[in-house]
Image (cartoon, helix red, strand yellow):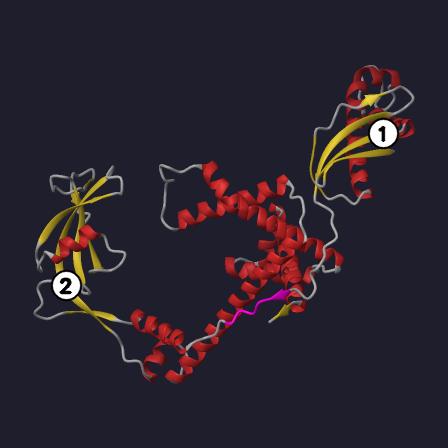
Amino acid sequence: MKVHIDSVSDVSKKLNIEVPEETFQSQIQRAYSKVIRSAQIPGFRKGKAPKSVIEKKYGKAIESEVYQDLIRDTVTQALEENDYHALNISDISEPKREEGKGFSYTASVEIKPKFEPKDYIGVKVKKSETKVEDKQVQDVLDRLLDQHSVLLPIEGKTSPEKGDHVSMMVEEVKEDGSSKCDHDHDHSHHSHAQEQIHLVGHADARKEVDEAILSMSIGDTQQITLSDEKDENKVYAKLTLNAIKKKELPTLDDAFAKTVGPFESLDALKKQINEDLKAEVAEKNKVEHARQLLEYLAKKNPVTLPDSLISAELASLRQGVFNRMIQSGMNSLPKDFSAEKMDEELKPEAQKRVHEELVLEAIAKKENIDVDAQEVAQKLEEYAGMMNKPVGEVRAEFEKSGKIQEIRYRILNQKTLDFLLDKANIA
């Protein structure tokens, strides 16, 4: 086999491959022998039909299959011999056959860029000085107090003011104020009114709701109109003020600490909060150090980025955006949504991630950093715990979907990043 490679770019190659006559004929003979043994031709016993008959009936199909097999095998061999990691193989030409001289063909291949990583040991990284302050501990305690608070009616108060919590019935109604209710087969009515607790003056509160509440007294009912920013969709709601309440916080003491968790005292609770915050800070610092390191390595190791990797990363980022939309309660895309605009905004991040991953992969190869089966098994156990499934079931699912290789890749990247951070000059 002869291989000539035209370099279109660092990540795009054109393979010109010549397959010798001996290889072609050997494969042809093997293919004919296989068909002759199994073919059932009228007038001949199984396996006894002459080659000329088989050739007449199956010749073109056999030759086509031989071409496909040899092209697949020789492309693979050419890639291995040149240490190319193929991402995409396309534009395979029709084989050109010359009697007695084998055949030739061309193929376009997109590959991962080959480069020698440099300047990755002892990278200077500015140390993040984030520390746990007493105020952060107190903020956590305040949130815990708020979570364990109760709302109690304010005796004698009939009109709410900013800062009050109010209990009210809210019902979506028609513009004329009539109830929007369901009708079942018996023509009975089901009210849509729901009790809600509202904090007057809260930053996220609708202005129309606050204005209505501040003009009401207990027992009053008022209809309001809620519109979107473009005033295209209007919703009418009827509010009935039931009660005005205040939030009562528990006392911050040893007894409270015991209700929160397995803590014998308030000091024990504070100590645990401090340790948890330190762990969070350490992780944030590590993320920041990694960001600086990767940014430096990308500048020191410029590479041509394969389009297919950028497209795959872009698709992943796009899916992440959609998932967050769903989690936030959005059940439809905004009217001004543009897939092209979103891709344009996400593309720089996709390029950045691909670049960083290629550099990490090259460093891992040079430093002989690898992932063993035990590390993959441990990660699968973590996923199984999060998914509340047997680890065997999770492994089977991941192997079927091809995610095992993705897990190996993530572990490898993290190991390489940990190696680089350990060797970095963080000061």
Residue 249 is left or right of residue 122, and the answer is left
x%, y% of residue 106?
Answer: 77, 28
Q: Position of residue 274 (x, y in %)?
A: 45, 77
Q: Is residue 251 left or right of residue 421?
A: left
Mark 1 or 2: in front is: 2
Reading the image, the residue beneath label 2 is: 161
User: Within the magenta stretch, is there residue 29?
Assistant: no
Tell me the kind of residue under disc 2.
Glu
Residue at 48 percent of width and 36 percent of height: 340
The reply to whether residue 404 is in sight is: no
Q: Which residue is at 68% across, 68% downward?
A: 423
Left/right placement of residue 336 relative to residue 9 reads left
What is the magenta range?
124-129
* Res 174 → quadrant: top left
Nearer to me, 188 or 407: 407
- Binning the other alpha carbons within 10 Å of mark 2 as few (below 14), some (14 to 19) or many (20 upward) gives some
Residue at screen point 79% across, 31% down: 71
